[in-house]
Amino acid sequence: MRHAQDGAAAAMNAVSRILVARGKHEPHELDNPDVTWGQRTRDGVWAPTRDGQRIHIGIAVSGDQPATVLRPSLRVFVGVEVDTDIVAQTTDAGVRLLTVLHGPDAPTEFRFPLSLAEGLALEAMPSGGYDVVHLRYGATVGRFYNPWAADSMFRPVKADYALEGSTIVMRVQHHGAYYPVVADPLYSQ
């Protein structure tokens, strides 16, 4: 098992390389006082919606690791699954859970259980993402953008979502990729 600091550095290095290659359209890391992180992986994160409510995004993993907090807007959960870390970022409008797969033994599915405030629901979008919709007004108050994934050669890796009850399942078909592979669930209000 990797030491938490070494694991955090390896995960950050992988994420930084991929994000730089992806370019300027990536959301910027920013301290957001409306976002509240749990202390351990399974605690997940509470994020705001556009109508002033909050949703809870859980991280369902086999290893319930404490966060290595690098700064208030950035934390790393090392060893959440076999060969897998999560780099969790706060953005100006939500959160990003960059999932780093370090080898072929890493899982191909990652579960993010959701708790939505009363009156909110998920609606599948043609893009492959999900909108958080206020049922009474029909307004979109948050969005899970279609996931992307890339390997260390900056090649796209197939990633998509499936919905199981109130859990978003991110599927990453990483076999045959050059590791590490970075996949990105992104929620924004």
Image: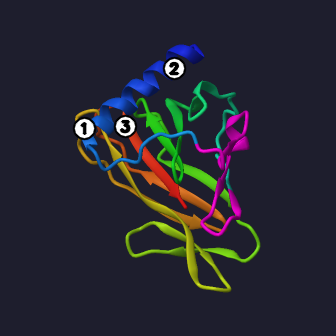
Element type at marker 2?
Answer: helix
Pick the quarter of the image with the C terminus.
bottom right
Q: Is residue 152 left or right of residue 130?
A: left
For label 1, the SS is helix
Was residue 140 drawn as part of the magenta stretch in this picture?
no
Q: Nearer the viewer, residue 55 or 129?
A: 55
Q: Which residues are magenta?
A: 32-55
Residue hosting label 1: 21
The disc, 2 or 3, on the residue closer to the chain's N-terminal end is: 2
Q: Is residue 33 above or below residue 2?
A: below
**Sooner in the amino-acid sequence: mark 2 or mark 1:** 2
Sequence-wise, which precedes: disc 3 or disc 1? 1
3 vs 1, front mark: 1
Question: Mark 3: few, some, or many residues within 10 Å (few <14, many ≥20)?
Answer: many
The residue where tag 3 is placed is 181
**Which SS class for mark 3?**
strand
